[in-house]
Amino acid sequence: MKTFSLTWTTVALALSASGFGSVAAAPTAKPDVSYKVSSSPSKKSNFGLGAFIETNINSGTDGGLYAELIRNRAFQDTVPGSDQNDVLGQGTLASWSAVGSNSKLSLSLKNQLTGALPQSAVVSASSASSKSACGIANSGFAGVPVQQQPYALTFYARSPSGKTETTNVKVGLYSSDYSKSFVEKNVSLALTSEWKQFSATLTPSTSTGSNDNVFAIQTAEACGDGLQLNLVSLLPPTWKGTVARPDLAQALADIKPVYVRLPGGNDLEGNTIPAAFNWTNAVGDLKNRPGRTPTWTQSWNTEGLGLMELMDLTEKWGAQAILGVYAGYSLNGKAVAASDLGPYIQSALDQLHFLTDTSGKWASLRASYGRAQPYQLQHIEIGNEDWLGAAVNTYGPYRWKAFADAISKEFPKLNLIASTLLNGVQGAKDVDNHMYDTPDGMIAFADSMDSTSRDVNVWELEYAVINSGLTHDTDLYGGPGRLQHPTLIGALAESAFLCGAERNGDVYYSAAYAPIFMNEGPNLTQWTPDMLSFTPNQMVKSTSYYSQYAFGNNAIASIHSSSPSASTSSTKIYHSFGSTTDGSKMIIKMVNTNAAAKTASVRLDNQSRKFSTSGATIWQMKGSDAQAANTVSNPNAVTPSTGALPSSALQKDHSLSLDLPAYSLTVITIPYN
Ligand code: AHR
């Protein structure tokens, strides 16, 4: 984020002295909108920003947040472009290539490492003489980033013929044409018929801006018997002891989410019932995690960023988990029959015991995986989007009740969130709605939020402006207006929606943008726009990211009611007034979705309380182009600014007079006298 070195007061003085006007509106001008704001809080706010760590989509976990650099590390991927692979052990050599003309690569289901990772690669010589070296290379998820930092390499190997022999190999990072070697290390492998894990640390002597690199294992001399390999892993330094890519994890930490929803989305449901998220396959030693058919990508879902890894991240982000449990419905429209639901319900209960028990077999299992202390868990979402397709015909009639009753019986303190209230859902006190729309659609929704029913707590655990609205598409998802990246006007519409959620924070508990991650590599993205897009060595913060940054970093503990002089539908200016936990400051959020600058006046209803600009701050995102978007080639098209609120904003009558630039989100934190 850009930070002004001068305070806004200084800038204001300098600008007015040079005749360009000031950042505070002229006190005599009639403002475009005035607000009378209650000087005492009207209600407690329950609202907390959410983040949705949606697995698999856009290669955002494998290939993204999960720091693993080797793609198809256990030879499970589908042939790119072909139908999705549904069967364990039916993998390919995708993303792997032979090094040099002497190498032959093949897949083997013989001598399996584990039942979970049955396929392995055999590297041998292409000719019988085998006098030259042979090797295998991996090109990563759209490249391998090379920085001058330690990379932890681990892999399993055995002798393909089962002989006991020492094979000397070179492991290293190279440009894809092998003209540059960034690091190369000799490792002596004592191979036998048994699989053994080997490790090395690779520290390149230099960094490169190019991602067109590979990781390779080659024999150091004649190929001989070659090698049989599996579970090849290369991890750069990760975020705070987790397995996460540091820039992506830190960007998430910086928006200060209060809630983190995991693991999907559609990826919770899977394309078929056997492909649904099964927590037992997403915990423990990596060699015992079979992974599963991907819901979105063509890279096998490794579940390396599994249940505990996701919970660990949530904890490090200081957030509360909202754990999605599979509720017996998958994306092919098939629902588990009521009479067959038992094992699925038991699996959900076991998962909750595994995460939260303090003693017993599940607590011991968790401890054996390195976590003795139970995880904190308060919120469970049962299913995903059960208003869609055939899901709605079974959720209300039996699936919700079967899961909700069983979970509440064993875990009475857990808050259960329904994924829809349609079709006879009984007893749900909380519901997750999703909101994908155009800027106008999102703003129309924001305009309606003050009349939300107070009967049920609302969680909006997926929201985004996904279509520009400029082409008036009847299909927002498939029409030409579908956005590739969040735009400025889209982020402002989302900010108007977040203002609505804050104003109604007695009933709106959270909102989470979706999806968060987008791998920009060829054929790695399935859903746009996304909050953070990235290549192996670059991350781009979108306008929607900055909107969430503003709300997460300026959370309110209580809501101040306000009456604007004109309706939001006429002014196109949106607002939220709240106070900090200690009540010492008011936080004012204003969104100007107009193409022209506007002015606003804010007055407290009780003059016994007065604003002070001493220590007051202003944060602002603005731009002249409504369609501006931050992209890999133009990452800083729109960036926010922050500084001190100029004292000229405070008027003699103790009201605040504010300029709202065209297309802007402004957040003011102001103490009382
Ligand atoms: O966020 C993308 C997808 O949108 C989610 O997986 C699904 O829940 C929703 O339909």
Image: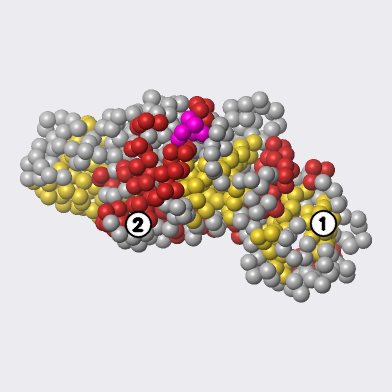
Using the image, determine if residue 346 lies above or below residue 110.
below
Looking at the image, is mark 1 or mark 2 nearer the viewer?
2
Query: Which residues are drawn in magenta?
Result: 394-399
The amino acid type of the residue labelled 1 equals Tyr
Q: Which mark is residue 190?
A: none
**In the image, 673: left or right of 408?**
right
Q: Which mark is residue 35?
A: 1
Disc 1 crowd rating (10 Å Cα; few below 14, some 14-19, many 20+) is: many
* The C terminus sits in image quarter: bottom right
Using the image, determine if residue 641 lies above or below residue 221.
below
Is residue 396 magenta-colored?
Answer: yes
- For the point 82% across and 67% down, which residue is it? 606
* The N terminus sits in image quarter: bottom right
Q: Earlier in the sequence, mark 1 or mark 2?
A: 1
- For the point 22% across and 32% down, which residue is it? 107
The amino acid type of the residue labelled 2 equals Asp
Is residue 591 magenta-colored?
Answer: no
User: Of 153 and 619, which appears nearest the observer?
Assistant: 619
Magenta: main secondary structure? helix
The image shows residue 516 at horizontal and vertical percentages of 52, 45
Residue under numbered circle 2 = 357
The image shows residue 198 at horizontal and vertical percentages of 20, 51
